[in-house]
Amino acid sequence: MLLDKQLIADSNAAAITEHQRKFNFTAAGIDNVEAIIKKLMNFQVAIPSWALGTGGTRFGRFPGAGEPGSLEEKIEDVGLLHALNNSSGAISLHIPWDIPTDANAIKALAAQHGLLFDAVNSNTFQNQPNQKESYKFGSLQHVDKAVRKQAIDHNIEVIKHGVALGSKSLTVWLADGSCFPGQLNFRRAFENTLEGLHEIYAALPEDWKVFVEYKAYEPNFYSMAVGDWGQSLLYANKLGKQAYTLVDLGHHLPNANIEQIVSLLLMEGKLGGFHFNDSKYGDDDLTVGSMKPYQLFLIFNELVEGMDAKGMDHATDLGWMIDASHNVKDPLEDLLQSVEAIMIAYTHALLVDRKKLNEAQLNNDVVAAQEVLQNTFRTDVRSIVAEARLRAGAALDPLSFFRSGKIRAQLIKDRGINTIATGL
Ligand code: AFD
Ligand code: MN
Ligand code: MN
């Protein structure tokens, strides 16, 4: 389903006066607003293929209506999001769920929607039909070399699929670990995992990156093979210059200081990218910014400060991706909310008065430093984000347009009530 751009233009025209009033008021006090808008227009967040359908928990899944049932339909959904917000210009695939029958046709379909292929994700946390070796006791860590080899071969196959689609990165999230004390020899598990990662790394095209994603717990509840940022950094440093850490916001123990982790990984040049989501308790995969919007802003504050210190390109030098699961919301509405939260946090971070903050820090003026951040966070920047969309021909208010435009109803008409989408 290709959105009629004229309908978006008409909807924008109806709201333009109010938008201009808000934008002129907000922009009046911001002398670098044009530079900020330019950055927002370039900033793209990759949408995970597995988030386009209703997720589920171990207690059940309640599929929504008109959800995608094929890779083609997933690409069409991301194309819809991108037409609405101009900030969802890539899709991240999960192999083997998203193996294209015809890679060239899929590439052409993505191009028609203005989409690129972001990182490809391997899957050694499930046994696939007819799979010879079982991952029940892990994959790259496994005591049996045959299981490790199967996992290595799978990751190398995933790279090949990514190359065919123009992707430039592989994300390895290992569910490996242990559920009980004594189950694993930690050193042997680390050495097995590192050996496998080295073989995967050797298969990377020279212009590719590999992201080693860490997670504190789940599905193993006593230890994980890559359990925290330190372990991920250890692997990445041992693997080489194409290996990086991947920060999934939901993968930290409660109250972890993620903004400090991000700042230090960025300093080391080993921050590969993000899986954005939000959480109250664990790896809840909730809508970005729905629980801890201030933390999201503090993370972006460190990112902008750290990237500018290194002269990095905000849009291209890190992997920006959502990793979420929707159980009670329309997936597309949830994703529109998530992208909006990311763009707002990024705008706030671009607005921070770095000179004033730095002065306050050097003078140990704690209150002044806090005021700089809190005043910025309390500034309503939604009209700036909307202006960036308007200038790109996207919707001033993507969520309202989606809901009032009865787009889901059209998708149900096109696809039927319940298509079983593959994915988490
Ligand atoms: C699950 C894992 C992890 C991984 C994602 C996609 O917790 O976040 O990145 O699946 O494989 O959410
Ligand atoms: Mn993730
Ligand atoms: Mn996760």
Image (cartoon, rainbow, N blue to C red):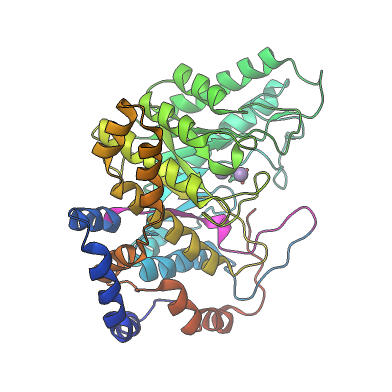
The x, y position of residue 157, in whole percent, is 52, 39
Residue 110, located in which quarter of the rendered image? Answer: bottom left
The x, y position of residue 128, in whole percent, is 69, 45
Tell which of 34 and 329 is nearer to you: 34
Residue 163 visible at all: no
Quarter the N terminus occupies: bottom left
Q: Where 121 falls versus 340 (above or below)?
A: above
Residue 370 visible at all: yes
Q: Where 295 falls versus 262 (above or below)?
A: below
Residue 16, located in which quarter of the rendered image? Answer: bottom left
Magenta stretch holds residue 305: no
Tell which of 371 and 186 is nearer to you: 371
Q: Residue at point 68% right, 45% down?
A: 281
Q: Residue at point 65% right, 45% down?
A: 283
The x, y position of residue 237, in whole percent, is 45, 19
Residue stretch in magenta: 42-59
Q: Where 211 falls versus 233 (above or below)?
A: below
Q: Find ligand 3 in the image and state its quadrant.
A: top right
In the image, 394: left or right of 278?
A: left
Q: Residue at point 61% right, 27% down?
A: 226
In the image, 247: left or right of 268?
A: right
Prevailing secondary structure class for the magenta stretch in the rendered image: loop
Magenta stretch holds residue 50: yes
The x, y position of residue 130, in whole percent, is 72, 44
Total labels drawn: 0
Tell which of 41 and 71 is nearer to you: 41
Q: Residue at point 41% right, 40% down?
A: 370
Tell which of 250 and 231 is nearer to you: 250
